[in-house]
Amino acid sequence: MAKLKKTRIKVKGMHCPSCDILISDKVRELPNVEEVKADHRRQEAEIYYSGHFGDNQLEELNKKINHFGYRAFQSSSDYERSTIRQEPLTKRFLDVGVIAIVLFIVLYIVQDLNLIPNFQAGSSLSFLTVLVLGIVASTSTCMATSGALFLATVGKLNVRSKTLDGKTSSSQLQTSNFIPAISFNAGRIISYGFFGFLAGLLGQSIVANFQLSSLLTLVISFLMIIIGLDMAKIISLQSLFTQSLTKGLFERLEHRLIKNPKKTSFLLGAITYLLPCGFTQTVQLYAIGLADPVKSALIMMIFAVGTMPALLAIGFASSFTKSRYFPAVQKVMGTLVLLIGFYYVNNFLGIYGYDLKFLTQKQTQASTDTFTIENGEQVINMNVNSSGYSPNTFTLKKDIPVKWQINGENTFGCQAFLVVPKLGIQKTIAAGQNVIEFTPKEEGTINFSCGMGMYRGVMNVVKG
């Protein structure tokens, strides 16, 4: 066996482990190439080949990767000349600030005009927002590998159909590709739903413990802020962290499955969940924070549905990625994720009775309820439902025992885990009647919330 030769090429547009996977796959399709080691941090690929590797191969590679937003160069000097200088950091911060202000103004206007329902504390990331996030994610280079895998599935079938029958019509080709295309996307949706369900179970088990649930809120907020800053191009996560743990597993599964795409298109779609992507990671974190397996599964499935149109029309998605509008869309979505991260910070503070008022959503409040006296006790009643706590504001008197009667109507989400830090109370709300008894010993406010700080309420204690 002839000794392999080695060369390095520069690849413009690489910025995450998904890029490494896509570039490696496309370089391996070239003749004489035996192995590839792509590195997005260095913006290069190390190629091991036999025979010859020159300008013709580079031109062929660019035909394969240009529509995904990449461009390969033989020399570092050519790469440097093509690289556009990054925007100053101050301008990037200014852009994010302006976008955040605009988002706040738009949100308050549409809510005041009742064009959209008022968001509840536990639903800051609505189904519509997640759908839009999926659509934007599918046009980003982070999701380019899913597009490449999709093309490999349907595209190879296309070639085989033409080879087997030179007279095959375009309508027949479309029909033969329709089922694998649907199967590929069905695999994505179901796998996202499955892992979303697991994320919800994880969040639910963590939230059941008050100490861990408040920590989870803080961790989620920190990670969302970091991901938001990365998406808005303020920082670069990939320059700070090593390769994603899922990258190697994805590559091994991909290489095995892609040998027979017609039979494995469903599984090929399913393993795209393992792709490292900031958009997906954001929704994964949110799914954990919901602490509700069903809602978490729905959120992840809706996100996957949002990626379908662009995957089915990958040519449009790729051209949009290279358009002058795409960086602005990325900044908007990055700013949105950043604000959601700060919203989670506010939730964490809310557990202990503190609020960043401009980030606090209005919550459904049926009334400010007062007690009734029964057998020398102050009796208050509250419902736990999908909107949180109703009513969520009470007036009590100092030094008189309280019987807090809680009716559990919806006990499957975060709202089912009640915490009252000032009184040292934490309780899992069961379906039906629940009772908590205590005696307020001092005047002031007693804050209560779910374990994640999403749903909140307050008791105002006055002089007896």
Image (cartoon, rainbow, N blue to C red):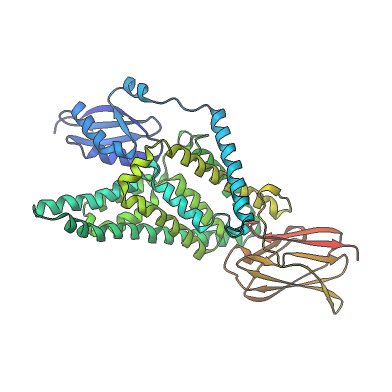
The residue closer to the viewer here, 359 or 286, is 359
In front here: 374 or 366?
A: 366
Q: Residue furthest right?
A: 464
In the displayed structure image, the side of residue 187 where residue 334 appears, left or right: right
Q: Kindly tell me whether residue 3 is visible in this rendering.
A: yes
Vertical side of 312 occupied by 334: above or below: above
The furthest residue to the front: 113
**Residue 19: which quarter of the image?**
top left
In the displayed structure, does residue 42 sit left or right of residue 34? Answer: right
Q: Picture coordinates of residue 400 (x, y %)? A: 87, 69
Give x and y (percent) for residue 205.
56, 62
Q: Quadrant of the C terminus?
A: bottom right
Above or below, 37 against 76 in this view is below
Q: Is residue 242 visible?
A: no
Name the side, left or right, on which 4 lies relative to 65.
Answer: left
Could you tell me which residue is drawn at 47 percent across and 62 percent down? 298
Residue nearest the observer in this picture, 228 or 120: 120
